[in-house]
Image: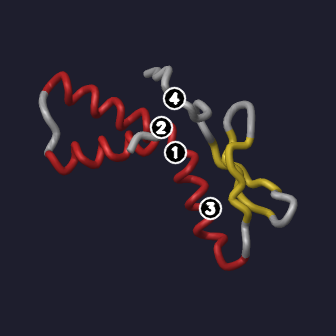
């Protein structure tokens, strides 16, 4: 699925152990570049690895939500609460208010 309106770096993204220059940490990388550096500090190491995996999954989750939204437009409607959450999440990614 493609969306020419996307402004973020295309996926897939992956999590790799990196070196931020300050401390070892987790990097989120695309094929061509480092997307984010989740530097590891002693008190937050576990959360930073989990955050890195969540961030790396973002393009895939975006595509999944777009597919759900498109499918439901063709075959019916989502539960209002689910429709609201899907629309709100996609709007946030797309920079809409």
Q: Which residue is drawn at 46% across and 23% down?
A: 3
Residue 94, quarter of picture? top left
Estimate how packed mark 2 is, as few (under 14), some (14 to 19) or many (20 or more) residues with alpha carbons within 10 Å.
some
* Quadrant showing the C terminus: top left
State which tag comes first along the sequence, 1 or 4: 4
Disc 2 vs disc 1: Cβ atoms closer than 8 Å? yes
Estimate how packed mark 1 is, as few (under 14), some (14 to 19) or many (20 or more) residues with alpha carbons within 10 Å.
some
Circle 1 residue: 57
Circle 2 residue: 60
Q: Residue at x 70, y 31 (%)?
A: 31
Look at the numbered disc 4 and give the secondary structure of its residue: loop
Look at the numbered disc 3 and give the secondary structure of its residue: helix
Q: Which residue is drawn at 22% across and 43% down?
A: 83
Look at the numbered disc 2 and give the secondary structure of its residue: helix
Q: Indicate the position of residue 48 as horizontal and vertical percent values.
A: 62, 64
* Quadrant showing the N terminus: top left
Q: Indicate the position of residue 33 as horizontal and vertical percent values.
A: 74, 37
Q: Indicate the position of residue 88 as horizontal and vertical percent values.
A: 33, 46
Q: How far apart are marks 2 and 1 (CA)?
A: 5 Å
Circle 3 residue: 49
Q: How far apart are marks 1 and 4 (CA)?
A: 16 Å
Disc 2 vs disc 4: Cβ atoms closer than 8 Å? no
Circle 4 residue: 6
Q: How far apart are marks 3 and 2 (CA)?
A: 18 Å
Residue 9, quarter of picture? top right
Look at the numbered disc 1 and give the secondary structure of its residue: loop
């Amino acid at each position: 699925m493609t969306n020419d309106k996307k402004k973020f770096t295309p996926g897939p993204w992956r999590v790799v152990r990196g070196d931020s220059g300050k401390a070892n940490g987790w990097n989120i990388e695309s094929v061509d570049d480092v997307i984010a550096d989740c530097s590891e500090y002693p008190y937050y190491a576990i959360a930073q690895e989990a955050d890195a995996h969540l961030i790396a999954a973002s393009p895939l989750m975006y595509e999944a939500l777009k597919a759900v939204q498109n499918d439901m437009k063709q075959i019916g409607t989502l539960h209002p609460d689910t429709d609201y959450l899907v629309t709100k999440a996609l709007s946030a990614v797309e920079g809409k208010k």
